[in-house]
Every structure is written in C-alpha cells, then in structure tokens.
Amino acid sequence: MNKNETVQQPLRSGDLLGGKTALIRQCDVCGMTTAIDLDPTPENFKTMQFFGQYVREVSREKAMELWKKAGKCKCNGTLAA
Ligand SMILES: [Zn+2]
C-alpha cells in the first residue's frame, strides 16, 4: 500500500512553502474546521475566505488531521445580519 501515490501534484512557483502545506479555514468563534485546500496558492487563499472565518496555512499533515475532525460550523447562521 503506497499512500503517497495520489497525493503528488505538480507544484507552482507561487506555492507559499514549497507545496508541503495546505490551507485550512476555521471559524473565528467555535474554531471548527470548515474547509481545507491542499493547493495553497494565493488565489485559493482568496477563494476560501469567508465572513466570520479565517484561513491559514498549515502543514499538509496537520490539515489532514484537522479535516478528519471537520464539520459544519454552527455559528454560520447566526453571523448574518
Ligand atoms: Zn463557528
């Protein structure tokens, strides 16, 4: 079993830390992870930004770990208005 096979992607020169990181989005209030993106380009960073949540860059390992615990943010509905 080789886990690494499908994870490799061509890296772009714009990768923030050499492509070994990922972007995650977490709620400002409850800290729930609501999204991850394994392609940490500035473009994706912008796309992921969402009101009331913050996007940051972490290692891919950390991102996958957080993704397992990710779920729906309960604050989402209450932030509007
Ligand atoms: Zn929340």
Image (cartoon, grey):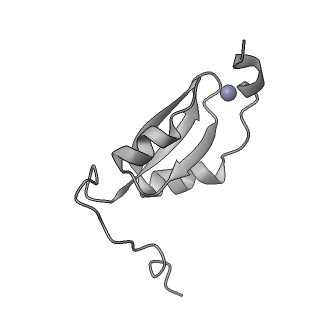
Q: Quadrant of residue 20?
A: bottom left
Q: Position of residue 32 (x, y in %)?
A: 64, 35
Q: Quadrant of the N terminus?
A: bottom right
Q: Please, which residue is most extreme toward the left here? A: 13
Q: Is residue 55 left or right of residue 31?
A: left
Quarter holding ligand 1:
top right
Q: Nearer the viewer, residue 21 or 76?
A: 76
Residue at the spot 51% in from the left edge and 34% down from the top edge: 49
The correct choice, above or below, for 66 with respect to 55 in the image is below
Picture quadrant where residue 46 is located = top left
Instruction: Specify the quadrant that holds the C terminus.
Output: top right
Residue 58 placed where, x, y %? 40, 46
Count of marks overlaid on the render = 0
Could you tell me which residue is drawn at 45 percent across and 82 percent down?
Answer: 5
Residue 16: image x %, image y %?
A: 27, 49
Observer-nearest of 79 and 17 = 79
Q: Position of residue 71 (x, y in %)?
A: 71, 44
- 62 relative to 46, above or below: below
Q: Residue at x 60, y 52 (%)?
A: 67
Q: Nearer the viewer, residue 81 or 25?
A: 81
Residue furthest bottom in the image? 1
